[in-house]
Amino acid sequence: MPSEAAKPEREPSAGVPVDQGLSSLGLLMQLGGSLAAAGGALSILTIVFAMQGRDRDLLPLILVLGLCIVRSLVLRIAGTELLYGKYLDADGIAKNPLFGMRRYVVVALAQTAIIAFIALAKFDIPVQTVIGLVLALLAWPVALGVLLQTARFQRYRISIPVSEDKGFEGAAIVMTVLGLSGVLATGLVLFVTFDRDDHALTQGPGVLLMLAMIMLVIRSGLHLQAGLSGLRETSIDRSVELANRYANFGVISSFCTAGSLLLLAMTSSMGLANLSVVAALVWALVTWPLIIRRFFSDRQFADLLAGDNASAHRRAPDAGLTSLGWLLVGFATVLAMLLIPQLVSEARILGVSQQSELLSFAGPISDRSIWWNVGLTMLMLWTGIELLRMSRSHRIVGIVYGVVGTLVTLYVFWPAISAFRQASTWGYSVIAEPSLLLVLPTMTLQLVLPIATLLLVTRKITPTARARFRVKVAKPDAVDP
């Protein structure tokens, strides 16, 4: 009887790319880790300014948030290693490409245990509330840990193969979804601000703020254009060109926005706490363009370096749907992390007054029942898993989620959508209030995801080869007759 080591590895399932969409997972882990680290840094600065004179509780809170930042940075590093990691260590010994993900799981488990101990020993938080916090913190590392133990990912013990299309179509789907969410979010803020009858918007800092918001709308439009190009173009050159254009403009617009907000802070009563919001916002804005630029540049350079030996770009068998699956699973996990504490306990975590707002932005920001969001999150998670497996029923499940998810999201968020139209107090407050910045992108993304899923699972795909990067070929010398 042959040993387990002698058994051949299972081949990837039909309809699934050879890398199982791990390139897009690496992009999402980089983005999520960076945004979470920015949020943790913002929370530390906010608490430091808010808890002056209460030094007894300040150090434990900073320790808790510092552990959250470390965990977030480890998540980003794991995503980077998934995309660009070296599979040989300094001694030339083969290194597991998924080691970074395993390291993140271990760090997340340790961080959760330490935070639970601090919550019980230092803050005397009720056990029920701590249980909700622990379950929320364990949602993503447990999901990753379970996936890593499946045979689907155990085959990547030595190296992760590059997808048939270099992962470009999957990245294009992620860019399309995030770009459309950005267009809706920034467009809504710009509309509400223009709708205000405020003389301050026509003077000095108000004009700068309006210009910064217009730049963010243009940036989101370029983001969406680059994503759509990757879905419909057969030339890789055009997709890479548009992605780099978005990345360049994204970095410039981030710092222009920062400059406008700093000028606004200098000419108004905005304090140091709100300046930290500006710094965190710029951190969040500049992160994704840099991630996208490196991703496309790295794969373009690898092809140019290989020259004529480079493999032909073919459309991946899933047409990028596994990347959509990772996006759905990741976002469903984020929503679960925010919903679980509400289900377990209504008490405020760590005694921070803004925590209830940060938890509520996942859905029940109106009088709707939280169970609408629980059901929608479960449906989103199921759809993501079916897309990762590319099962026979993935199209049907995607259509169901697209229709039901759109209707339920509109029902849940309709009071909030109506409130934007009547928000005469918006304008500068949307920049100065962190909870408002959290509600808007989550609401738009939760609305865009089911619509994008419905369109992507029902589109007709032509499995044609895709052009490689253009290479000038010398014409043969003319032959005399």
Image (cartoon, rainbow, N blue to C red):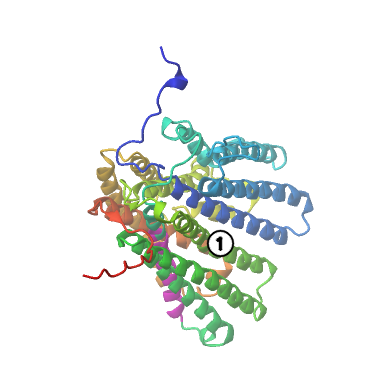
Name the chief secondary structure element in magenta: helix
Image point (74%, 49%), residue name: 57
Q: Is residue 404 magenta?
A: no
Farthest-out residue, top: 1
Q: Residue at x 44, y 72 (%)?
A: 217
Tell me the magenta residue range.
176-196
Q: Is residue 297 visible?
A: yes
Residue 190, image x and y in percent? 44, 75
Relative vertical location of residue 301 with respect to residue 96 in this rendering, above or below: below
Residue 264 found in image quarter:
bottom right
Q: Quadrant of residue 46?
A: bottom right
Viewer-proximal residue among 300 and 478: 478
Residue highlighted by disc 1: 284
Q: Nearer the viewer, residue 441 or 457?
A: 457
Q: Residue at x 24, y 54 (%)?
A: 459
Judge from the rendering whether residue 89 lies leftward or rightward of residue 14; answer left or right.
right
Label 1 SS: helix
